[in-house]
């Protein structure tokens, strides 16, 4: 289950979401997550797989459906793979936090969503 603080955060953003256990993980889907400009889609569903021990243990990677690609059809670096979870095919964004980047007892779902947003923004190519 999600911690109360995490559920309150999601609700404060106005996001529709669902979560379900998957072995030692919790699959959290945020529906209609707004992407930054620079992708062929403006909204997608965001999957975060929360590990057992979260928030003391950091999540690893995130997934989007539909895939976020550039207008020229190319894939963002580290987002070429597809994986199936909760009966859907997701674009895996291979992004990792080191142990020193995740502060157990301080970081939480809000921190991880900020990490995701920063990575999505940084992956948009700079116009020449």
Image (cartoon, rainbow, N blue to C red):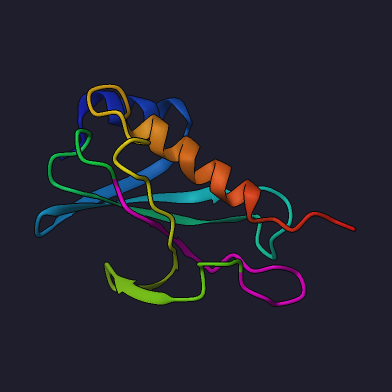
How many labels, in total?
Answer: 0
Percent of width and height locating residue 60: 32, 53
Question: In the image, is residue 73 above or below residue 128?
Answer: below
Q: Which residue is at the front of the view, 76 or 101?
A: 101
| Quadrant of image for the N terminus | top left
Question: In the image, is residue 18 above or below residue 104?
Answer: below
Question: Residue 35: in sight, yes or no?
Answer: no
Question: In the image, is residue 10 above or below residue 45?
Answer: above
Q: Main secondary structure of the magenta part?
A: loop
- Which residue does the image show at 61% across and 73% down from the upper left? 75
Question: Residue 81: in sight, yes or no?
Answer: yes
Percent of width and height locating residue 122: 64, 49
Where, by quadrant of the figure, is residue 68 drawn?
bottom right
- Which residue does the image show at 27% across and 42% down from the upper left? 58
In the image, residue 82 lies in the stretch drawn in magenta? no
Q: Which residue is at the front of the view, 55 or 128?
A: 128
Q: What segment carries the magenta color?
A: 59-75
Left-right relation of 96 to 52: right
- Which residue does the image show at 13% across and 46% down from the upper left? 52
| Quadrant of image for the C terminus | bottom right
Left-right relation of 24 to 124: left
In the image, residue 61 lies in the stretch drawn in magenta? yes
Left-right relation of 89 to 54: right
């Amino acid at each position: 289950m999600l911690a109360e603080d995490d559920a309150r955060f999601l609700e404060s953003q106005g996001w529709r979401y669902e979560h379900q256990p998957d072995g030692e993980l919790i699959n959290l889907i945020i529906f209609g997550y707004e992407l930054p400009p620079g992708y062929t889609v403006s909204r997608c569903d965001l999957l975060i797989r929360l590990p057992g021990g979260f928030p003391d243990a950091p999540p690893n990677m995130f997934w989007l459906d539909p895939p976020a690609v550039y207008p020229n059809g190319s894939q963002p670096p580290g987002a070429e793979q597809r994986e199936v979870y909760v009966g859907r095919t997701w674009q895996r964004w291979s992004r990792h936090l080191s142990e020193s980047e995740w502060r157990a007892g301080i970081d939480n779902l809000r921190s991880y969503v900020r990490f995701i947003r920063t990575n999505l923004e940084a992956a948009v190519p700079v116009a020449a």
